[in-house]
Image (tube, grey):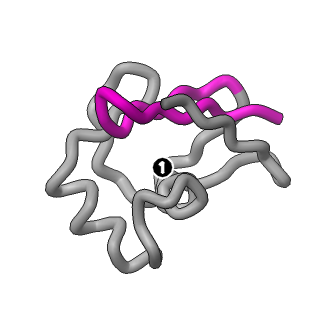
């Protein structure tokens, strides 16, 4: 499944994107989620909760779920 996340500002953090996609319920769950699940941003493994995502970035959460960041 592919989801598109529309930016309301210049960027969104990885934690905010995971929350918006429904992968986590609260920001506090992000650290655990990123340790337990390999999340890739533009093909690179990413574990920083505060990673800034901009329009055009692609986040792969699982083989079944990817997020497209758009403006």
The residue at 34%/32% (across/down) is 40
11 displayed left or right of 34: right
In the image, residue 51 lies in the stretch drawn in magenta: no
The residue at 32%/25% (across/down) is 44
When the figure is inspected, residue 21 is found, relative to residue 64, above or below; the finding is: below
Q: Quadrant of residue 31?
A: bottom left
Q: Quadrant of residue 41?
A: top left
Residue 45 percent coordinates (x, y): 27, 32
Q: Depth check: give the residue in front, 3 or 68.
A: 3
The magenta stretch spans which residues? 56-71
Residue 33 percent coordinates (x, y): 26, 61
The residue at 21%/48% (across/down) is 37
Residue 29 percent coordinates (x, y): 33, 74
When the figure is inspected, residue 1 is found, relative to residue 33, above or below; the finding is: above
Q: Which residue appears farthest toward the top when viewing the image? A: 43
18 displayed left or right of 48: right
Q: Which residue is mark 1?
A: 51
The residue at 29%/49% (across/down) is 47
Q: Secondary structure at mark 1?
A: loop
Point out the image quarter for the C terminus: top right
Report the label total: 1
40 displayed left or right of 37: right
Q: Quadrant of residue 63?
A: top left
In the image, residue 58 lies in the stretch drawn in magenta: yes
When the figure is inspected, residue 48 is found, relative to residue 54, above or below; the finding is: below
Residue 4 percent coordinates (x, y): 67, 36
Q: Which residue appears farthest toward the left when viewing the image? A: 36
Label 1 neighbourhood size at 10 Å, few (<14), some (14-19), many (20+)?
A: some
7 displayed left or right of 29: right
């Amino acid at each position: 499944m592919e989801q598109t996340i529309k930016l309301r500002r210049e960027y969104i953090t990885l934690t905010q994107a995971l929350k918006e996609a429904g992968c986590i319920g609260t920001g506090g769950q992000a650290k655990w989620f990123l340790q337990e699940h390999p999340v890739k941003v533009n093909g690179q493994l990413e574990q920083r909760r505060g990673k800034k995502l901009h329009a055009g970035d692609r986040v792969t959460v699982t083989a079944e779920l990817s997020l497209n960041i758009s403006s």
